Amino acid sequence: MNAEHESVMPSVGTNRFEFIYLTLRNRICLLDYEPGARLSEETLAREFSVSRTPMRRVLGRLEAEGLVEVRHGVGNLVTDIELSYLCDVFRLRMEIVPQIGLLSPLPVTTGLLDRIVKVESDCLLLAANPQPKRAFAQLNIVFFELLMELVGNPSLREILSLLFYRSSRMWPYLMTDDVVQAEAGIFQREVSETRQLLQGGAIAAVGQLRRTHISMALQRLRQLLEQQGRGQNLS
């Protein structure tokens, strides 16, 4: 698997503002920028060859989405990962995600199915990847974005995306490399089951399947935190 999965990075045709926004969001969600990291407007503006004004807009959008915070006298910082809040986000995602197959679902295309098959096969390559946690996080993002191609309701897609990216840092932040292998097997089964449902035209069932897997992920998150001695404050 390539260092950057082709569906994770923004495409060449993306407008400049969106390109910068998606690039920074990916870096945050893949922990290239770790929680607490300072994001300098000036440095980023130089990197992307833009003025500080559009960079300020990008950082403002990331702040509104809960990925960046502004501290007076310090600057723009990547937000910390609050575990109790993370569990709340998972619970909300569970309630909303079944709507994928109910609110104006879009047709399943051959191209979409082919890309889902590729995610399945890429799961098998995680063990050999030199950065398995990062690679797993990449695949998780890719699969989510593929599912969003089924969502025809723009408001639903916006809410699902906001909640997903707020919680997507969980696995690379918490997992050890050995846990990745177990999670990769579970994830591959979810991808395979999703593909089979889509091939059978059961789009409504995809949302329910997704809900089930989010629920199981929440349970595993609680178990992992208990093992690490960090589960005391979880409700």
Image: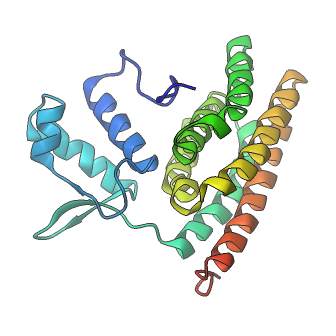
* 75, 98: nearer the viewer: 75
* 121, 191: nearer the viewer: 121
* 196, 108: nearer the viewer: 196
User: Eyeballing the image, is 19 above or below 70?
Assistant: above
Q: Residue furthest bottom?
A: 232
Quadrant showing the C terminus: bottom right
Query: In the figure, is residue 67 to the left or right of 100?
Result: left
Q: How many marks?
A: 0
Query: In the figure, is residue 62 to the left or right of 109?
Result: left
Q: Residue furthest top?
A: 110
Quadrant showing the N terminus: top right
Q: Is residue 201 visible?
A: yes
User: Eyeballing the image, is 92 above or below 196?
Assistant: below
Residue 127 position in % (x across, y down): 67, 39
Query: In the figure, is residue 179 to the left or right of 211?
Result: left
User: Eyeballing the image, is 89 above or below 48?
Assistant: below
Q: Residue at x 51, y 59 (%)?
A: 173
Q: Residue at x 79, y 47 (%)?
A: 186
Residue 15: name its quadrant.
top left
Q: Is residue 107 visible?
A: no
Residue 4 position in % (x across, y down): 47, 29
Q: Residue at x 52, y 42 (%)?
A: 131
Residue 105 position in % (x across, y down): 71, 30
Residue 195: name its quadrant.
top right
Q: Residue at x 26, y 43 (%)?
A: 58
**How did the renderer colour the structure?**
rainbow
Residue 78 position in % (x across, y down): 32, 59
* 76, 30: nearer the viewer: 30
